[in-house]
Amino acid sequence: MSIPQPKPLVGRKATAVKVEFESPRRTPYVYFGAAEGVSMGAGFCEIPPGSSNVRHAHPDADEVIYVLKGKLRFVFDAEEHLLEPFEAILIPRGAIHQIFNDGPDDAAHTFTFAPSGPEGAIKRMYK
């Protein structure tokens, strides 16, 4: 008797939920998360020059951000970190943070939440 194998879940930009924030400007794409019944959420975010996200925290999930393009400044209560392409940061659940693109060019990063949940809030709150 063969045991059914789990199927991979592929997230593609063409089918991701695109959310455009106007103030501050940025464009996240949510690929998958709790709505698809998986234990982590994932997506991609484009941040134009001179923009940021809002100061916030994820009380129920850790977040990993991997910088793909540009330089991003991560601001926490007691410290800051400047990340360049191919660098990553783990933001522990509950850590208040804000991300800035202070550079002259577009920046982009991936985000992963574990467990999933915050990506659903992005979809619901800004559609």
Image (spheres, rainbow, N blue to C red):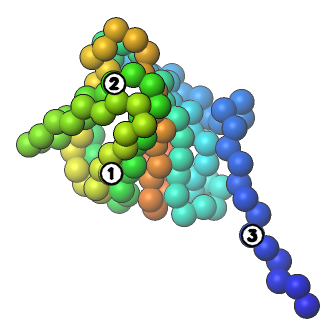
Q: Which of marks 3 and 2 is nearer the N terminus?
A: 3
How many callouts does the rendering have?
3
Q: Name the residue under label 2.
A: 71
Q: Residue at x 39, y 22 (%)?
A: 70
Q: Which residue occupies the foreground of this view, 45 or 58?
A: 45
Measuring from the top left, give residue 110's x and y in whole percent.
48, 38
Amino acid type indicated by mark 2: Lys
Q: Can residue 121 be seen in this view?
A: no
Q: Which of marks 3 and 1 is nearer the N terminus?
A: 3
Label 1: state its secondary structure: strand
Query: Does residue 35 appear anywhere in the picture?
Result: yes
Mark 2 or 1, nearer chain start: 2
Would you identify the image quadrant in which residue 76 lies? Answer: top left
Q: In which quarter of the image is the C terminus?
A: top right
* Mark 1 neighbour class, 10 Å CA radius: few under 14, some 14 to 19, many 20 or more: few
41 sits left or right of 62 in the view: right
Q: Residue 6 carries which label?
A: 3
Toward the right, the furthest residue is 1
- Give the number of the mark in front: 3 or 2: 2
Given the current orientation, which residue lies at the most extreme bottom position? 1
Pinpoint residue 85: horizontal percent, then vertical percent.
41, 31
Q: What residue type is labelled 3?
A: Pro
Where is the N terminus found, in terms of image quarters?
A: bottom right
Using the numbered discs, state the Cα–Cα distance from disc 3 to disc 1 in whole angstroms.
Answer: 27 Å
State the separation of the CA atoms marked 2 and 1. Answer: 16 Å
Residue annotated with mark 1: 90
**What amino acid does circle 1 point to?**
Leu
Disc 2 secondary structure class:
loop
Q: In this view, does 25 lie above or below 108?
A: above
